[in-house]
Amino acid sequence: MEVVCRLAEIVAKVRGQRPLVHQITNYVSVNDCANIVLAYGGAPVMADDLEEVQEMVGIASALVLNIGTLNSRTVAAMLLAGRAANERGIPVVLDPVGVGATTLRTKTAQEIMSQVKLAVIRGNASEIAVLAGEEAVTRGVDAGGVQSGTLLFGSALAVSEQCVVAITGEHDIITDGRTTLVCSNGHPLMAKITGTGCMASALVGAAVGVTDDYLLATAAALVSMGLAGEYAARESGLSNLGSYRTHIIDYVGKFTHTDLQSGAKIHAQR
């Protein structure tokens, strides 16, 4: 219960402080990523031009880098923004969408990791395995060949990068290499619409923008997203995917401290 109370405090801080979350993200989910940050209580900005990313990072509370739809211009912007964020002590979140699927994605993720100090990496099991140096086959951005050793990969990556690693799936694993939290909130329908992972990373950006406890901030964001997935399934039914997406954002905008405390399914991994 103590952990859940601390997660609720972080969400309250987001709503009270309204952190500016600078996202260089992909054009498939950019609108949803902006709207879910707004619903959570943050302020999104999606600037990705080389002429302004450094200036924009300078006024942001957090930076989210999402490699879902890459091109040479946005890769350069991500690296420039990431270095600027490091210079200013602004936390950086990496969403390595589809890493391992192509050489460009893998190279870009590796460049970001080598040039930018990250606060959080959030991905699925396949993506995290690739970043940890394991082989996995990525089909689209949601499938993977890694079924075992997920916690081992995540912990190894967290230690090597000195950051928090979040592996999202049926059970979300959040680790800094020493402490590991497991969140079991969510619903299978979340895998049926595009962008839920991107939205989760956007929420992580908002949460790390108000605290330097990046482990608990990441947990707060993922519990919030998982609860939203559960609520949306109840409200929309199992076949109305368009409504389901909308109800996710609805919930993030209205859930209460009590909702989080009563609904959070999270525990420390022993």
Image (cartoon, rainbow, N blue to C red):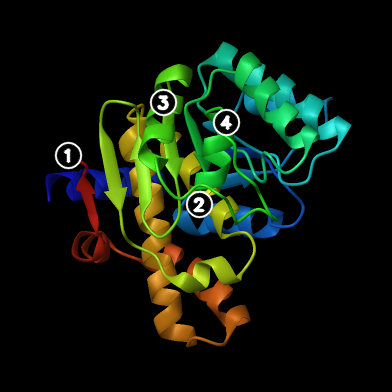
Q: Helix, strand, or loop for circle 1? A: loop
For the C terminus, the image quarter is top left
Residue 245, percent from left and from top = 57, 72
Q: Viewer-proximal residue, 170 or 247?
A: 170
Q: Which residue is mark 2?
A: 200
Q: Which mark is residue 270?
A: 1
Crowd tier of the residue under label 3, counting other residues whose Cα lies within 10 Å: few below 14, some 14–19, many 20 or above? many
Q: Amino acid at mark 1?
A: Arg
- Alpha carbon distance from label 3 to label 2: 22 Å
Q: Amino acid at mark 4?
A: Leu
Residue 15, percent from left and from top = 39, 49
- Alpha carbon distance from label 1 to label 4: 24 Å
Tell which circle, 3 or 2, labels the residue nearer the N-terminal end.
Answer: 3
Q: Viewer-proximal residue, 221 or 124?
A: 124
Q: Relative to residue 226, is residue 81 depicted above or below?
A: above
Q: Is residue 48 visible?
A: no
Q: Quadrant of residue 163?
A: top left
Q: Residue at x 60, y 27 (%)?
A: 59
Q: Which residue is mark 3?
A: 156
Crowd tier of the residue under label 4, counting other residues whose Cα lies within 10 Å: few below 14, some 14–19, many 20 or above? many
Q: Amino acid at mark 2?
A: Ala
- Alpha carbon distance from label 4 to label 2: 19 Å
Tell which circle, 1 or 3, labels the residue nearer the N-terminal end.
Answer: 3
Q: Which residue is mark 4?
A: 131
**162 sits left or right of 38 in the view:** left
